[in-house]
Amino acid sequence: MQLGVIGLGRMGQIVVERVLDAGHDVVAFDLDDDAVAAAADAGATPADSVTDLAEALGDEKRIWLMVPAGKAVDAALDDLEGSLDADDIVVDGGNSHFEDSVRRAEATDAAYLDCGTSGGPAGAELGFSLMIGGPEWAYDELTPIFDAVATGPEGHDRMGPAGSGHYVKMVHNGVEYALMQAYGEGFELLANGRYDLDLEAVARTWNNGAVIRSWLLELCEEAFREEGSDLGDVDDYVAGGSTGTWTVQEALEQEVPLPLIYQALSERFASRDDRFSRRLANRLRYGFGRHEVARKDE
Amino acid sequence: MQLGVIGLGRMGQIVVERVLDAGHDVVAFDLDDDAVAAAADAGATPADSVTDLAEALGDEKRIWLMVPAGKAVDAALDDLEGSLDADDIVVDGGNSHFEDSVRRAEATDAAYLDCGTSGGPAGAELGFSLMIGGPEWAYDELTPIFDAVATGPEGHDRMGPAGSGHYVKMVHNGVEYALMQAYGEGFELLANGRYDLDLEAVARTWNNGAVIRSWLLELCEEAFREEGSDLGDVDDYVAGGSTGTWTVQEALEQEVPLPLIYQALSERFASRDDRFSRRLANRLRYGFGRHEVARKDE
Amino acid sequence: MQLGVIGLGRMGQIVVERVLDAGHDVVAFDLDDDAVAAAADAGATPADSVTDLAEALGDEKRIWLMVPAGKAVDAALDDLEGSLDADDIVVDGGNSHFEDSVRRAEATDAAYLDCGTSGGPAGAELGFSLMIGGPEWAYDELTPIFDAVATGPEGHDRMGPAGSGHYVKMVHNGVEYALMQAYGEGFELLANGRYDLDLEAVARTWNNGAVIRSWLLELCEEAFREEGSDLGDVDDYVAGGSTGTWTVQEALEQEVPLPLIYQALSERFASRDDRFSRRLANRLRYGFGRHEVARKDE
Amino acid sequence: MQLGVIGLGRMGQIVVERVLDAGHDVVAFDLDDDAVAAAADAGATPADSVTDLAEALGDEKRIWLMVPAGKAVDAALDDLEGSLDADDIVVDGGNSHFEDSVRRAEATDAAYLDCGTSGGPAGAELGFSLMIGGPEWAYDELTPIFDAVATGPEGHDRMGPAGSGHYVKMVHNGVEYALMQAYGEGFELLANGRYDLDLEAVARTWNNGAVIRSWLLELCEEAFREEGSDLGDVDDYVAGGSTGTWTVQEALEQEVPLPLIYQALSERFASRDDRFSRRLANRLRYGFGRHEVARKDE
């Protein structure tokens, strides 16, 4: 099969290589010439533009978008407009909001598959987990490609109609925030508790047979190996948060309580600034109890 | 009535003055001579020692302990041992753990009343709220004293047997933590939200007729008036936490969920240090997504 | 001053009566004839329609909308269209979303004041707390009306430009959810704890001098007096939630953590159904530990 | 090596079988004769009593206790008293509180290893994760046994001195509660969200390559396969909670905030009864807003 890939960042390059390795042909484009050259080195046919890529694909185009969520997806679809018809298939493999995917599926002449992609750069070797929404025929048609990009046939599935792939991926990320924070709480207690522990050894022991073993716990093990049991100079600032925010927003719509996921998201927000609420509590303790007020730079 | 008061800190002095103002007699003792002199200035009879105080009170001793929770209470009771019999009444007006109060009630020859005292230094004028546990006859006997120390007859009540006064006070403080944090969250959103608001004006408007009006909200109003809407240099460090900790411990025993109170207590703990859990989350985002790790001092 | 009032439900009638009591004139309209008749009985001039009301007000119309948030507000403004010009003032005293108020302020020919109203039916006697957004001249012009509807001059204030009144009211309600749940946790522990307590007496004692005294705690006292310390047959179902949801949504936008308010909102959602997450936890304990699975109707 | 095993429930039998399979000898005892017979069938030497077992082991006794945490451990140690000296080693493989383990290590004449055991009945094939505290020589001496019971050399480690094994296991379980609830929240949203999803397929797709893949997620997959995407008649009652409670208690001592773990524990408590706090909130909404009170059996 021949696949066009638009967007050749870290994740896009992995898609290109895994698809090539599985014996398919790839036509590759990115705004960055170096990224196109890297894909060509790997065996892809380079394209000069989206239009060029579309022409190279001929009829029954199969195109994978691996660009940042948001305007870049719409820009790519704009560039493709006029080149697509109902026999073509476009996959959005990025972290788009599911409502954007529903909108794009309706607006695009081609069949549109929204594909949540999980596994990170580690997926280069193992393959990704792909959660896919959209028309069944398009999913079936692209199965050989999904087999190649995913860990194998078990690593991808059609979740349902348009938007469902990115919906499931959104929830995946919300769960991910909570899992990270849950492990973090456990290690925080161990790091401040009664014993002087080697946290890498703790994580390794847990990863071999314990109920809480997981890939994230393997990453904890790696982190303690590389940074030490005290995490060295790693700061307590946590970036990111958009997919977790979407998850909570959707849960508010559905009136589903997500206290752990919300709390994990809150920790990210709280990591970025003083807490005004604590400053007020500090001051109020003076108000009613004449407890000394802690002041900054004291 | 004649009352002995042991412990003449800020709260003890208020007890002395309110009891004197109501026309009773007070014998006062503290380890600090200046505090005894201050009580004497207010009209109390000074005592040189606990034994001296006990002797001055004659039969049917009524003694109010207003000393720090913990060893100071046991030390005062040790000093009183031998001077007390079943006709005497001892009141512990401090923040003792209810299980200590149960133990002391059993070990003391006198009737023992555990008295949770709320209202802070502001109670000097208004009077306190008194939550009292112990024998009914002793509570009835001391009613004139409680009328004087409390806001009046409505401001004190017998909660039940030994320990119940400090038990109710413990829960009061747990609720207090959560209320402070709840107001704090609201003001934190207002301080970081879409409008440039005068938070003193917000608090004042709320305190006049709004559902959430309260004494703590009046203290918020005062805080914003004195510190400004940005709370000036007030730090986000919150001290204290023992009674909140006791509340959560008791709720664990009773299997009662207290998520808001626990969260408010957690904010205090979290205010005192980096969060290890966030540092791990920061590092894990590199592990799976190769997101840049924020380092300290960058 | 002459005020037109559109919407004569419980809250609207209170506005009518308080404005009349202050010596102003009121023209009143509601879709329900009985409500109009009740307002007329109180001394208002009845109107047959919004148009009739607008005509009765002459130039420099001052109109208070007290209709349910959402379409009813837009419908009333539609009916007023054509009757309003830049000298007129419309107040929306309901629980509108602040973004709707900003939109309406821009679309309306009259000056538009968004007015968050707190205090509930109890405000009939005491007066309300009014948080007002919009043009300063309009707020100043209506001050006599606000003095009458609020608890007095301290019970209302201009928060800032369009939308700020409803914004502050939205946050007020988020705080309200958390305060209710905080008191609830305290009483839940007392109701399940070591002592057999009279919760009305606890609440009354707290309301007289304790740090956590408040109007909501007075309502707790009333609830225990009327329902008993076990709350009788009061169910653990909590309705409502829209303003709390808006508060959390806005905090997500601003990246402000609101763990207590979120938790309080979550309790409402959780009260309405089984928790799927608990059902899965129940089943997973079988998965790893062969613990017996609790089944429904056993 | 020869190992005595006391306690032949599900977990004890697995220990017996894995140790026998590794070529060691086992002497086995349980109060239940059938359990002893089952161990004998597997190749162990049956013992009639603890004393009998101790005698059968000769000098340098190595004994594994696999009895319920609490009094059963003390009873077994009592029965062993007099038979043990400083050359002997006792392993407690159950879920004891770490402070009990410290106490027992001090009181026992033998070397004492506290061994947290994770993996559940599934460990029969795979082997367990063993977190071990106590003297280094005893840990080294028993390494062949630990290799056999664990997944292999990577599946066990000495955490530190007495108590550290059960300490790390306690925290493991606290994390386990939070992970289960985190997955549960994600699936709760999916089950109540916008798409009709096959949750087994979601879990399977995630387990193949996604960031959140784990053994617990494999158990989720199994649960949905066996119970359906709606979990059939699985109730929302969650039993258990002692190790999670210990984790939170220890974190209170150490002033480490564990909001997710606490929340997960709270869900268990909340699953067992009405929430009094919600009942009060329901009633308070009538108090200030005259909202209808939901009553039971309506």
Image: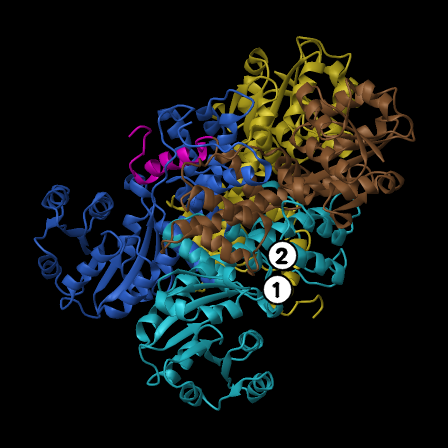
Chain colours: A yellow, B cyan, C brown, D blue
Does the magenta portion include D275? no
Q: Is residue D31 visible in this depiction of the protein?
A: yes
The amino acid type of the residue labelled 2 equals Trp
Percent position (x, y) of residue D259?
A: 51, 50
In which image quadrant can residue A88 be found?
top right
Question: Are labels 2 and 1 on one chain?
Answer: no
**Residue beneath label 1, please?**
A288
- Horizontal side, residue A150 vs residue B158: left or right: right
User: Residue D133, how many percent across, how many down?
Assistant: 34, 61
Q: Which mark is residue B279?
A: none
The residues colored magenta run C273-298
* Residue occupied by mark 2: B215
Give the residue type at disc 1. Phe
Question: The disc numbered 2 marks a residue on which chain?
Answer: B
Name the residue: 46% across, 35% down: D184
Q: Position of residue C45 (x, y in %)?
A: 78, 25
Secondary structure of residue under mark 2: helix
| One can see residue A262 in this view | no
B108 up-or-down from A48: above or below: below
- The N terminus of chain A: image quadrant: top right
Image-based side of D218 in relation to D285, left or right:
left
Instruction: Give me the residue at 65% from left, 60% from top.
Output: B236
The residue closer to the viewer here, D211 or A179, is: A179
* Crowd around label 2: few <14 · some 14–19 · many ≥20 (10 Å): many
User: Which residue shows up at 36% across the image and 31% down it?
Assistant: D235
* Image position, residue D87 (x, y; %): 21, 68
Q: Which quadrant does the C terminus of chain A fall into?
A: bottom right
Q: Does the residue at mark 2 contact the one at mark 1 (Cβ under 8 Å)? A: yes
